[in-house]
C-alpha cells in the first residue's frame, strides 16, 4: 500500500506541473501544448508559430552567432538582440579613438552600417523526427563506440539527404538523454552589419553588481541587419549585397503590458540539466562549480589588472572579461540557490519515488539504475573537478591555444615547395594577424603562470595532466616569450624562414601537445565508466517517462529552437532592495534608472542626455499610459543561456520585449524549475525604441518597424527638442 501511495503522489505532483515550465520543440506544439497555450491567452494557431510551407513566427527568429538569439523586426532584415550578445562585435569595431562600447554607435544612413566581422545568423527551415530511424539500429548491448558509430553514420546520411548539395546546414541532435533524435535544417547568412548600439552606460547599466538581480534598469540591446545577394540568398560580405527581405518579421507593440498578459519566448536556449540526479547536483555544487568559480575569478583578476592600465587592452579583452564574469556569477549563484531552495532534497524525494516504481513487476530493467549513477559520480568526482580547472585554463590562457592552433598551419607551410608556400602565404599571414591583433602578451604570460599554478595547487595528482603538473608555474611566461609563438613578429620570422625542427622543438608547442595528449588519455581511461553512465542515464529518463505517461515531458535545452510560454509576472517585494516607489513589482521605470545614477561610476554612470530627457519627461509615444517611461519587466517564461536576445511576444504575435537575464533567487533553474521564484528579466521594447529615437535620434530605424498601437498609446511627439552640451574638447 505504501508503494502505491508514493507512486500516486509522485504522478500527481508532475501532473500539476505549471504550464509555464518547459522549453518545447516547435513541431510538437500542436500535439502537446496548443490547447494549453490558448487557454492562457494565445490568439495564434500552432501553424502561425511553426509552419514548413507558410511563413510563421519561426521565420523571424535567428540563432545569433551560435551563442545568442535574435529577432527580425522589419521587412529589411533588421535584427534586435541583446547588448551583451553584440558586445564582441561592438568591441571588435572599437578603437581607443572610436570607442563604440563606451560611446555607442548609430548608423544614421544605410551606408553607415558596417560588417560585423565573423558574425552569422541561422534561420530554421524545418525540423523532423529521426528517432525511429536511428533507434531501430541501436540496442542496449552495444558498446559506447559501436553506438556512436551507428549514430554518426545515420547523421551523415541524414545530412546528405537534406543539405541540397550544401545549400543548407543539417544538424542531428539527441534528446531525453539519447532516447530520441531530431534533425534540423538551417540556412546561414554571413553578411551581418552593425546598425546601432547604445553606450555601455545604457546597454550594460548596473554592470556585474546588478547582473542576475532584480530590479534591473538596463537597455540590454543592440541592432544589426542581415544582408543577402540580389536574389535573397546567403552571401559573403560584399558592398553590393542588399538587406534581406525575410519570410516573416515581428510587429512591435506599443500597447504596454500588465501582470497576467500572455507572453511567449522563442529562441535558442543553450543547455539545461533538468533530469540531472541528486548525485550529479551534489557533484556540481560541491566540486565542479566551486572549481569553476575559483579559476574564473583568477582569470578575471589578471585581465582586470591589465585592462585598467591600457585602453586598447580594455577594448580587446572586454568581451572575454564580460563572458567570464557572467558565468562566474552564475555558477556561484547556482551554488547558493541550490543550497537555499533545498534542490538536492527535492530531487532525492523524486528518486525515492522512482525507485518505488522500479520495484513493480515488469520494471526490472530500471531497477538499480540510480545506484549505478551514484557510483559513477563517486568514481569520477576528482576527474570532473580537474576538467573544470583545466577548462578555465585552456579557455583563458591563450598562449596554449595559439600554439596548438597555429602549429599545423606552420608545419604544412614548411613542408611545401616554393610554389606551395606562395599559395599558402597570404592565408597564413591573415591567420597570424587575426590571432595576435588583440593580444596583450604581458597579460597572457601572467595568465599562463597564474592558472597553471592554481591547477597544480588544487587538482588531485591521480587525475591531473602530467604535462601541467611538471611545469615550473612561476616561470612559464619566460617559456612563452622565448617561443616562436611569443608574438606576431616571431611567427612572421618563422614564415620568412620556415624550420620544421625549430617548430617541433618549440617548448610552448610541446606543452600544448602534451596537454592535448593528457586529455585524450584521461578520456580513454574513463571511457567504459562514461559509457555505462550514458546508458544508465538513458534508462533512468526512459523509466521516468514510462512511470508518468500522463505527463508532458519536455527535452532539455541543447541549442535548438524552443518555445516557452507564460505570463507577465511579479516577484515579492524584498526589504533589501530599492524599488524607487514601484509597488507592483513586475516592471522598472526611468525614475529608478536615474535614481541609481552615480556620476563617473564604472557601472552606474549615465549619459547626461538620458537624465535631461527624463527630467523633461520627454518620452513621446513610448511612455506607458500611466505616464512613466518603462525600462525592464518580468515574465515567468522558462529560459536559460542562449535565450539572450530572444523576443518576448504577446498573444497576437507582436514584440513586447527582449529577454536578457534570469533572477538570482532561481539560479538553480538549469537543473530544476523553481515554480515560485523563476522569472525572466526583459527589456521593455518601448525603452528600446525610446533609446533609438529620443536618445540617439536614429528615427529612421523606428520608421522601418510595423508599430502596433491602441487608443491608450501616447501621441508621437516627434524628434526631441532636448539638447545636451557636447563634452569639452581636451586641450592639446
Image: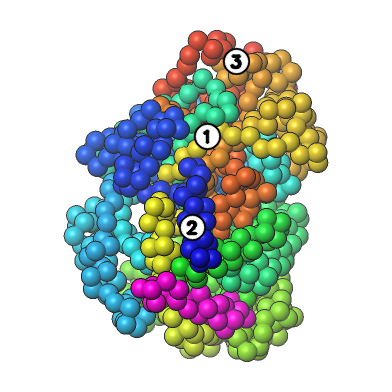
Asked if disc 1 and disc 2 are in contact, CB closer than 8 Å, the reply is: no
Query: How would you rate the neighbour count of disc 2 (Cα within 10 Å): few for under 14, some for 14-19, many for 20 or more?
Result: some
Q: Nearer the viewer, residue 716 or 400?
A: 716
The residue at the point 39 percent across, 32 percent down is 38
Residue 379 x %, y %:
57, 84
Q: Nearer the viewer, mark 1 or mark 2?
A: 2
Residue identified by numbered label 2: 8
State the image quarter where residue 623 is shown.
top right
- The magenta-colored residue range is 359-384
Q: Residue at x 60, y 50 (%)?
A: 674
Mark positioned earlier in the residue sequence (2 or 3): 2
Look at the image and say whether residue 381 sits in the magenta stretch: yes
Q: Secondary structure at mark 3?
A: loop
Q: Residue at x 56, y 59 (%)?
A: 671
Position in image of residue 390 (x %, y %):
60, 75
Residue at 56% x, 52% y: name it.
Answer: 673
Closer to the camera in the image, 680 or 358: 358
Which of discs 2 and 3 lies nearer the camera? The answer is 2
**Mark 3 lies on residue:** 625
The numbered mark, 1 or 3, whose residue comes first in the sequence reads: 1
Residue 110 among magenta residues: no
**Count the marks: how many?**
3
- Which of the two discs, 1 and 3, sits closer to the camera? 1
Q: Main secondary structure of the magenta part?
A: helix
Image height of 354 relative to 480, above or below:
above
- Which residue bears the numbered disc 1? 567
Query: CA gap, disc 2 to disc 3?
Result: 49 Å
Amino acid at each position: 500500500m505504501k508503494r502505491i501511495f508514493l507512486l500516486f503522489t509522485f504522478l500527481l505532483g508532475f501532473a500539476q506541473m505549471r504550464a509555464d515550465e518547459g522549453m518545447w520543440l516547435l513541431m510538437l506544439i500542436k500535439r502537446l501544448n496548443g490547447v494549453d497555450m490558448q487557454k492562457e491567452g494565445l490568439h495564434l494557431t500552432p501553424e502561425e508559430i511553426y509552419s514548413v510551407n507558410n511563413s510563421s513566427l519561426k521565420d523571424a527568429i535567428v540563432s545569433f552567432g551560435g551563442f545568442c538569439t535574435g529577432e527580425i523586426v522589419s521587412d529589411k532584415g533588421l535584427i534586435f538582440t541583446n547588448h551583451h550578445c553584440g558586445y564582441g562585435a561592438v568591441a571588435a569595431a572599437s578603437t581607443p579613438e572610436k570607442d563604440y562600447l563606451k560611446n555607442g554607435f548609430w548608423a544614421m544612413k544605410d551606408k553607415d552600417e558596417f560588417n560585423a566581422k565573423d558574425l552569422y545568423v541561422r534561420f530554421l527551415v524545418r525540423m523532423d523526427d529521426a528517432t525511429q530511424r536511428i533507434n531501430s539500429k541501436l540496442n542496449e548491448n552495444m558498446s559506447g563506440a559501436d553506438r556512436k558509430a551507428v549514430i554518426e553514420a545515420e547523421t551523415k546520411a541524414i545530412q546528405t539527404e537534406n543539405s541540397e548539395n550544401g545549400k543548407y546546414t543539417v544538424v542531428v541532435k539527441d534528446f531525453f538523454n539519447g532516447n530520441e533524435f531530431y534533425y534540423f535544417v538551417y540556412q546561414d547568412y554571413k553578411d551581418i552589419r552593425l546598425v546601432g548600439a547604445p553606450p555601455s552606460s545604457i546597454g550594460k547599466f548596473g554592470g556585474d553588481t546588478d547582473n542576475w538581480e532584480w530590479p534591473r534598469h538596463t537597455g540590454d540591446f543592440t541592432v544589426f541587419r542581415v544582408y543577402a545577394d540580389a536574389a535573397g540568398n546567403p552571401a559573403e560580405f560584399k558592398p553590393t549585397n542588399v538587406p534581406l527581405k525575410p519570410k516573416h518579421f515581428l510587429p512591435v507593440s506599443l500597447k504596454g503590458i500588465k501582470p497576467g498578459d500572455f507572453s511567449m519566448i522563442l529562441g535558442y536556449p543553450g543547455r539545461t540539466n533538468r533530469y540531472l540526479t541528486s548525485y550529479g547536483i551534489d557533484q556540481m555544487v560541491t566540486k565542479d562549480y566551486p572549481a569553476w568559480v575559483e579559476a574564473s575569478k583568477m582569470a578575471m583578476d589578471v585581465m582586470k589588472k591589465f585592462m585598467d592600465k591600457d585602453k586598447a587592452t580594455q577594448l580587446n579583452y572586454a568581451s572575454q572579461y564580460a563572458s567570464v564574469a557572467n558565468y562566474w556569477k552564475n555558477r556561484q549563484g547556482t551554488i547558493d540557490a541550490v543550497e537555499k531552495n533545498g534542490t538536492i532534497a527535492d530531487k532525492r524525494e523524486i528518486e525515492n519515488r522512482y525507485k518505488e516504481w522500479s520495484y513493480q513487476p515488469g520494471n526490472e530493467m530500471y531497477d538499480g539504475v540510480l545506484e549505478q549513477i551514484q557510483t559513477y559520480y563517486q568514481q569520477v568526482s576528482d576527474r570532473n573537478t580537474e576538467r573544470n580547472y583545466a577548462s578555465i585554463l585552456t579557455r583563458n590562457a591563450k598562449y596554449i591555444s595559439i600554439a596548438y592552433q597555429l602549429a599545423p598551419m606552420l608545419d604544412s607551410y614548411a613542408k611545401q615547395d616554393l610554389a606551395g608556400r606562395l599559395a599558402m602565404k597570404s592565408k597564413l599571414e591573415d591567420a597570424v594577424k587575426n590571432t595576435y591583433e588583440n593580444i596583450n602578451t604581458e597579460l597572457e604570460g601572467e595568465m599562463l603562470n597564474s592558472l597553471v599554478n592554481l591547477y597544480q595547487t588544487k587538482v588531485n595528482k591521480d587525475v591531473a595532466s602530467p604535462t601541467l603538473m611538471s611545469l615550473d608555474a612561476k616561470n612559464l611566461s619566460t617559456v612563452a616569450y622565448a617561443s616562436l609563438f611569443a608574438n606576431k613578429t616571431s611567427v612572421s620570422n618563422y614564415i620568412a624562414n620556415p624550420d620544421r625542427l625549430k617548430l617541433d622543438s618549440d617548448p610552448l608547442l610541446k606543452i600544448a601537445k602534451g596537454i592535448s595528449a593528457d586529455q585524450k588519455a584521461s578520456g580513454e581511461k574513463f571511457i567504459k565508466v562514461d559509457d555505462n553512465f550514458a546508458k544508465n542515464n538513458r534508462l533512468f529518463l526512459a523509466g521516468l517517462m514510462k512511470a508518468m505517461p500522463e505527463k508532458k515531458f519536455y527535452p532539455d535545452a541543447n541549442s535548438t529552437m524552443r518555445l516557452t510560454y507564460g505570463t507577465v509576472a511579479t516577484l515579492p517585494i524584498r526589504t533589501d532592495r530599492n524599488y524607487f516607489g514601484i509597488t507592483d513589482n513586475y516592471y522598472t521605470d526611468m525614475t529608478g534608472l536615474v535614481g541609481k545614477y552615480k556620476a563617473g561610476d564604472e557601472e552606474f554612470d549615465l549619459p547626461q542626455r538620458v537624465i535631461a530627457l527624463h527630467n523633461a519627461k520627454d518620452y513621446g509615444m513610448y511612455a506607458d499610459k500611466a505616464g512613466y517611461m518603462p525600462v525592464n519587466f518580468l515574465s515567468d517564461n522558462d529560459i536559460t543561456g542562449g535565450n539572450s536576445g530572444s523576443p518576448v511576444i504577446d498573444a497576437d504575435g507582436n514584440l513586447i520585449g527582449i529577454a536578457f537575464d534570469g533572477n538570482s533567487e532561481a539560479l538553480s533553474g538549469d537543473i530544476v524549475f523553481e515554480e515560485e521564484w523563476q522569472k525572466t528579466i526583459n527589456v521593455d521594447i518601448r525603452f528600446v525604441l525610446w533609446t533609438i529615437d529620443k536618445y540617439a535620434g536614429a528615427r529612421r530605424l523606428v520608421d522601418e518597424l510595423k508599430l502596433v498601437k491602441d487608443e491608450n498609446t501616447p501621441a508621437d511627439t516627434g524628434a526631441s527638442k532636448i539638447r545636451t552640451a557636447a563634452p569639452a574638447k581636451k586641450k592639446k
